[in-house]
């Protein structure tokens, strides 16, 4: 039996699915990327370090913030720059805003809609206008945090190596405080909404890997190391050396594995590694769901994302209050251009993102290397698909396709990122 | 009057322009009210409508064989075709590849196995099909998008005023980055973006393409020769505008 889905809707970028079942055995089950290769890493070589965040943010319109800031973090390391405390907080705020907007879009529009027969987000908006308005306001909050700091939400403008092209005004502290307090209750609505869905009962053991903050009591932060559910701990260098990417003829995607095996790197992975350090409301809500860890059910990534949305709204309030006593003046760092190498890891909405650069003494890029979350999560997704397919082959074609899409959507793959 | 059948199609790109449309919020519901929106992959997945279309909105540039095929099919099926964003309009960041030269070497830099991976020169979609209108920018200004599609919905043919980015920059009372000696492309770039970059301390890098008849030599003249043509052209490579500026310079 051959199962083929040509153009998967409701994901970022273009991909299809191919599965083969021969005499009851799954011989193939994988997401096939149909995206063009823009060769972003090659485009960076030979250009000024200043162009890097501009170009890398264009890898993805859904997560431009993380690409821009991860490249800046790597470049600053190469130049031996320590950004000011305020700069780091502002960057963390932008990253929090990014995770809120991306997760809400995914949870509601791209994934949960799979659980409603023949209805999309715009239809549900007509049926439950009050609920959907609140969901959209929640997403707008995330976008707004990015916008008031970065100048706009898609491809923000102000962040640069050493600090800011334009330092945000002090007004942002009150604005984030007011808007964040307003949407915090809305963030909890999504949890009940997701729990009301009939989430498939499917489990497959895997390794969970996520960035764990240097600070002991934090769920997410600018500085930290990779931690795995199998006890593996890695800094940037070790991470890049031990996570191996593979690419085959005729395909534009690279697939990443650790010790030859797939692993999870999404919101669910972050909860597995660091749920004890969620902000108080997120932690309480997670406890109230009664979920037991390890969970091993990839369909629950959507629920993990809703918990993160609560956490990151709380985090925006925490971070903005940390700025309350700063004038936000003179927060840029002076530096000298010099030859060097820098690498950085940060958590994107879909998992861990790695960037590294070599720079010459004139500030020109001589080497660029980017590994995206989707290059990592696709391998885990394919392994899940292989085990899930035999369980759903009894269904008719339409239902079978829907179940496959549910699983693919639960990972929220970003195909533009995976290809770049 | 029946609502115009409208499709939003993505070729290879970051999809930031499509996301900017989604970010319109309530105004998007307004658009959905006036236009019969089809093929909006990020918003509605379960439904797929075949053409023909009254309006096709295309973002991204063609890279895969399938991209080229799709683009030509869409053109055949559509009355009006709108290029959305810098990738469709100018080539976008992917076009840096053309200026670097040696495509083969570049693809080998990224992939070990290059067999079967499409690696064409990057072109604006107007090199492949006839384009009726543009919504420029990287990303688009979604307010401008709203105005343009709503005018089409009313049966009008919208246009973008030929004013430089400086026009809006001055209205916003920004400090002039050119006067600070920075290579800002505002004077030679088509406005309509609300001067969002210079308003955030970032030089204009011409993502909306040249103002009619404007080239790099004009910018050099305005900068009183403070920067050489080669360095300015390097900036113009970022959004794939270098070739357009070269054309203007020749005239």
Image (cartoon, coloured by chain):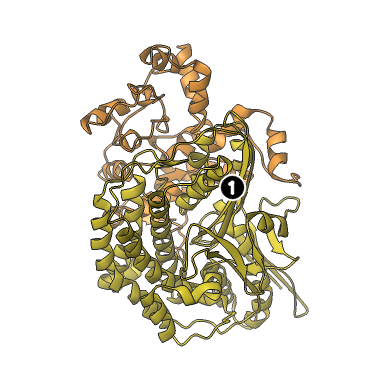
Q: Where is residue A373 in the image (x, y as percent from the top left)?
A: 58, 59
Residue at the far bottom in the pictured view? A290
Q: Where is residue B156 in the image (x, y as percent from the top left)?
A: 26, 38
User: What hue represents chain B?
Assistant: orange
Q: Residue at x 30, y 70 (%)?
A: A184
Which of the two residues, B38 or B160, is positioned nearer the viewer here?
A: B160
Q: Position of residue A243 (x, y in %)?
A: 70, 59
Question: Where on the picture, by quarter, is residue B140?
Answer: top left
* For residue A127, side relative to residue A286 (left or right): left
Residue that carries the numbered disc 1 in the rendered image: A420
Q: Is mark 1 on a helix, strand or loop?
A: loop
Question: Where on the picture, by quarter, is residue B102?
Answer: top right
Q: How many numbered marks are there?
A: 1
Which of the two residues, A67 or A252, is positioned nearer the viewer here?
A: A67
Which of the two residues, A203 or A351, is positioned nearer the viewer here?
A: A351
* For residue A206, side relative to residue A330 (left or right): right
Q: Can residue B52 be seen in this view?
A: no
Quarter placement of the N terminus of chain A: bottom right
The relative height of residue A257 versus residue B150 in the rendered view (above or below) is below
Q: Which residue is drawn at 38% across and 16% down?
A: B223
Q: Residue at x 26, y 27 (%)?
A: B167
Q: Mark 1 lies on which chain?
A: A
Q: Where is residue A183 in the image (x, y as percent from the top left)?
A: 28, 67
* For residue A168, side relative to residue A252 (left or right): left
The relative height of residue B104 versus residue A269 in the rendered view (above or below) is above
User: What hue represents chain A?
Assistant: yellow
């Amino acid at each position: 039996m051959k199962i083929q889905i040509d153009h998967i809707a409701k994901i970022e970028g273009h991909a299809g699915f191919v599965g083969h079942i021969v005499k009851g055995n799954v011989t193939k089950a994988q997401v096939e990327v149909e995206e063009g290769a823009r060769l972003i890493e090659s485009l960076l070589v030979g250009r000024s370090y200043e162009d890097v965040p501009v170009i890398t943010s264009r890898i993805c319109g859904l997560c431009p913030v993380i690409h821009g800031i991860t490249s800046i973090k790597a470049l600053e390391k190469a130049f031996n720059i320590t950004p000011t405390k305020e700069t780091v907080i502002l960057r963390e705020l932008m990253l929090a805003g990014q995770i809120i907007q991306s997760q809400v879009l995914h949870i509601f529009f791209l994934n949960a809609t799979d659980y409603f027969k023949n209805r999309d987000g715009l239809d549900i908006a007509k049926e439950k206008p009050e609920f959907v308005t609140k969901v959209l306001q929640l997403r707008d909050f995330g976008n707004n945090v990015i916008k008031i700091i970065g100048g706009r939400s898609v491809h923000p403008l102000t962040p640069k190596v050493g600090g800011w092209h334009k330092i945000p005004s002090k007004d942002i502290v009150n604005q984030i405080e007011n808007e964040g307090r307003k949407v915090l209750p809305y963030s909890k609505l999504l949890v009940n909404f997701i729990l009301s869905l009939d989430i498939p009962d499917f489990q497959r053991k895997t390794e969970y890997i996520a960035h764990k903050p240097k600070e002991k009591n934090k769920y997410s932060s600018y500085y930290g190391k990779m931690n795995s559910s199998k006890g593996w701990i890695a800094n940037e260098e070790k991470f890049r050396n031990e996570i191996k990417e593979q690419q085959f003829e005729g395909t534009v995607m690279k697939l990443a594995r650790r010790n030859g095996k797939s692993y999870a790197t999404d919101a669910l992975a972050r909860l597995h590694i660091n749920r004890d350090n969620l902000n108080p409301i997120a932690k309480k809500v997670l406890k109230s769901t009664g979920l037991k860890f390890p969970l091993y059910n990839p369909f629950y990534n959507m629920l993990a994302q809703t918990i993160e949305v609560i956490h990151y709204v709380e985090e925006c309030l925490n971070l903005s209050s940390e700025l309350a006593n700063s004038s936000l003046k003179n927060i840029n760092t002076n530096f000298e251009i010099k030859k060097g190498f820098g690498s950085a890891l940060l958590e994107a909405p879909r998992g861990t993102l790695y960037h590294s650069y070599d720079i010459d003494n004139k500030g020109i890029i001589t080497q660029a290397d980017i590994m995206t979350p989707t290059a990592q999560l696709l391998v885990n997704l394919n392994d899940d698909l292989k085990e899930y397919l035999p369980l759903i082959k009894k269904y008719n074609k339409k239902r079978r396709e829907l179940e496959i899409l549910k699983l693919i959507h639960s990972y929220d793959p970003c195909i533009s990122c995976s290809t770049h | 009057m029946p609502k115009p059948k409208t499709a939003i199609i993505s070729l290879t790109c970051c999809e930031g322009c499509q996301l900017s449309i989604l970010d319109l919020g309530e105004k998007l519901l307004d658009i959905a009210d006036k236009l019969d929106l089809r093929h909006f992959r990020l918003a509605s997945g379960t439904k797929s409508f075949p053409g023909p279309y009254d309006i096709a909105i295309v973002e991204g540039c063609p890279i895969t064989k399938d991209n080229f095929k799709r683009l030509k099919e869409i053109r055949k099926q559509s009355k009006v075709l709108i290029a959305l964003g810098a990738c469709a309009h100018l080539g976008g960041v992917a076009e840096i590849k053309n200026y670097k030269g040696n495509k083969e070497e570049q693809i080998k830099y990224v992939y070990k196995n290059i067999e079967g991976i499409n690696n064409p020169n990057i072109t604006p979609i107007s090199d492949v099909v006839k384009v009726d209108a543009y919504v420029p920018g990287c990303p688009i200004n979604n307010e401008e998008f709203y105005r343009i599609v709503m005018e089409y919905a009313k049966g009008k043919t919208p246009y973008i005023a030929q004013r430089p980015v400086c026009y809006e920059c001055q209205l916003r009372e920004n400090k002039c980055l050119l006067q600070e000696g920075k290579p800002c492309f505002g004077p030679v770039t088509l406005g309509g973006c609300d001067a969002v970059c210079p308003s955030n301390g970032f030089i204009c890098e011409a993502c909306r393409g040249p103002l009619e008849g404007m080239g790099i030599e004009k910018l050099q003249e305005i900068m009183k020769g403070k920067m050489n043509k080669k360095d300015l052209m390097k900036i113009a490579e970022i959004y794939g505008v270098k070739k357009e500026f070269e054309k203007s310079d020749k005239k």
